Image: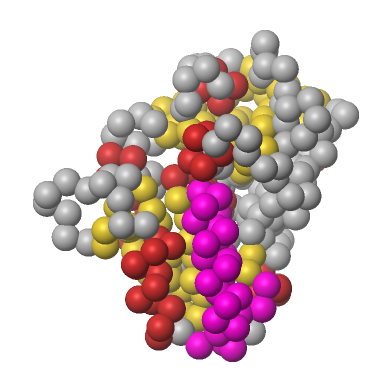
C-alpha cells in the first residue's frame, strides 16, 4: 500500500484513485518529514506471478532509532526517490517488534509497480542501492484497542492493501482464542494475489483467509466477484454488529461501500478501523 504526496496534498493510490480524474485527498495524511536517512535495499523481487506487485526489503541495521519507531501495524515510511517531485509513503508490511524483543533489521514492503510512478522506479532498483527514507515511521496505524471487545472481526483488503494487513496478522492479531477473524482478500485473479505462501501460517494464527477473485479463470471454485458486494453481503447476515469490529484497507470504492453498509446495519464508526 502506498500514499504519495503532491505539492499540496496527499492522495491514496488505489484502483479507484488510478482511474479517477480527480481522486479525493486521503483523510488525515501523514506529514512530510524534515529529517531523512539513507539505507540500502536488501531485496527487490516480484511478489505476484504477473509481477504487478513487488516485495521490497530495506536494510535498516544502521538505523536503530528508525527501526524502534515502528510501533503499530499499518504505519508508513516516507521515501524520497531520485527525480520524484514528492515523497511517497509506503505501508510497512513486516510486523512491529513485540514488547521486550529486539527489532528486525529490515522493513518489508509490498509495492504496486505502476509504470511511470515513483513506486515503479523503486521496484526497478537492485539490492544494495541506497534510498532516502524518513528518519522515523509516520501514521497512527490500526488502532486495535478500539475493537478489543469484539468477538468477530471482519477484515477487508484489496490489491496492495494486503500489505499492512500482513503486518497486523503477523504482529499477533487474531491469535486470541475468543475472537473469530475473517479476512476477505480481493484481487482480479490468482496471478495478482500476493502472500499466498503465507496463508497457511495466517490460518494457524487464527485468521480465516477468503480469497475473492473478480476475473478468475474457469478452474477457480472459490468466491467470485467483489468483496463489498455479494461475498460480504452473505457474511454480514451471520454477524451481530453489537459484537463486531471491522478493518479495511485498499480500494477506495470498497472501503466506502462497506463502511456505509456496516453503519447502516448498526456498527459504530468507532469500530471500523483504517490506517489513514
Which residues are drawn in magenta?
240-269
Q: Name the spot of residue 11 as percent of width and height, x first.
A: 67, 38
The residue at the point 16 percent across, 60 percent down is 221
- Left or right: residue 164 versus residue 184 is right
State yes or no: residue 254 in magenta.
yes
Residue 44 can be seen in this image: yes
Above-or-below relation of 15 to 124: below
* Vertical relation: 69 (above or below) 113: below
Residue farthest to the left, as pictured: 219
**Which quadrant of the structure image shows residue 256?**
bottom right
User: Residue at position x 67%, y 11% from top?
Assistant: 83
Q: Position of residue 70 (x, y in %)?
A: 71, 48
User: Can you tell which quarter of the image residue 212 is in?
Assistant: bottom left
Residue at the front extreme? 21
Horizontal and vertical percent for residue 270?
70, 73
**203 versus 162 height, above or below:** below
Figure colour scheme: secondary structure
Quadrant in which the N terminus is drawn: top right
Residue 63 position in % (x across, y down) = 74, 33
- Image mark count: 0
Residue 169 seen in render: no
> Looking at this view, is 194 or 21 the one in front?
21
Image quadrant of residue 222?
Answer: bottom left
Q: Residue furthest top?
A: 83
**Which residue occupies 49% across, 71% down?**
154
Does the magenta segment cover residue 143?
A: no
Q: Answer with left or right where residue 217 lies relative to residue 49.
A: left
Taking the spot 31% from the left edge, 57% from the top edge, the residue there is 225
Amino acid at each position: 500500500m502506498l500514499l504519495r504526496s503532491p505539492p499540496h496534498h496527499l492522495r491514496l493510490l488505489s484502483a479507484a484513485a488510478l482511474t479517477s480524474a480527480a481522486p479525493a485527498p486521503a483523510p488525515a495524511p501523514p506529514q512530510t518529514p524534515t529529517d531523512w536517512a539513507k539505507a540500502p535495499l536488501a531485496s527487490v523481487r516480484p511478489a505476484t506471478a504477473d509481477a504487478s506487485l513487488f516485495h521490497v526489503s530495506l536494510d535498516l541495521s544502521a538505523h536503530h532509532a528508525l527501526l524502534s519507531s515502528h510501533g503499530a501495524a499499518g504505519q508508513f515510511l516516507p521515501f524520497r526517490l531520485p527525480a520524484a517531485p514528492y515523497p511517497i509513503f509506503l505501508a510497512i508490511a513486516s510486523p512491529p517488534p513485540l514488547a521486550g524483543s529486539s527489532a528486525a533489521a529490515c522493513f518489508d514492503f509490498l509495492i504496486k509497480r505502476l509504470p511511470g510512478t515513483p513506486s515503479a522506479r523503486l521496484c526497478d532498483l537492485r539490492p544494495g542501492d541506497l534510498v532516502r527514507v524518513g528518519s522515523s515511521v509516520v501514521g497512527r496505524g490500526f488502532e486495535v484497542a478500539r475493537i478489543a471487545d469484539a468477538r468477530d472481526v471482519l477484515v477487508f483488503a484489496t490489491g496492495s492493501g494486503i500489505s499492512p494487513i500482513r503486518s497486523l496478522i503477523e504482529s499477533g492479531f487474531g491469535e486470541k482464542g475468543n475472537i473469530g477473524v475473517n479476512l476477505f482478500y480481493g484481487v482480479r485473479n490468482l496471478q495478482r494475489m500476493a502472500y499466498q505462501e503465507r496463508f497457511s501460517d495466517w490460518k494457524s494464527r487464527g485468521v480465516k483467509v477468503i480469497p475473492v477473485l473478480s476475473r478468475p479463470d474457469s478452474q477457480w471454485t472459490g468466491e467470485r466477484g467483489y468483496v463489498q458486494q455479494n461475498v460480504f453481503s452473505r457474511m454480514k447476515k451471520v454477524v451481530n454488529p453489537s459484537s463486531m469490529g471491522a478493518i479495511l484497507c485498499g480500494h477506495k470504492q470498497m472501503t466506502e461501500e462497506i463502511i456505509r453498509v456496516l453503519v447502516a446495519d448498526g456498527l459504530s464508526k468507532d469500530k471500523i478501523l483504517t490506517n489513514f
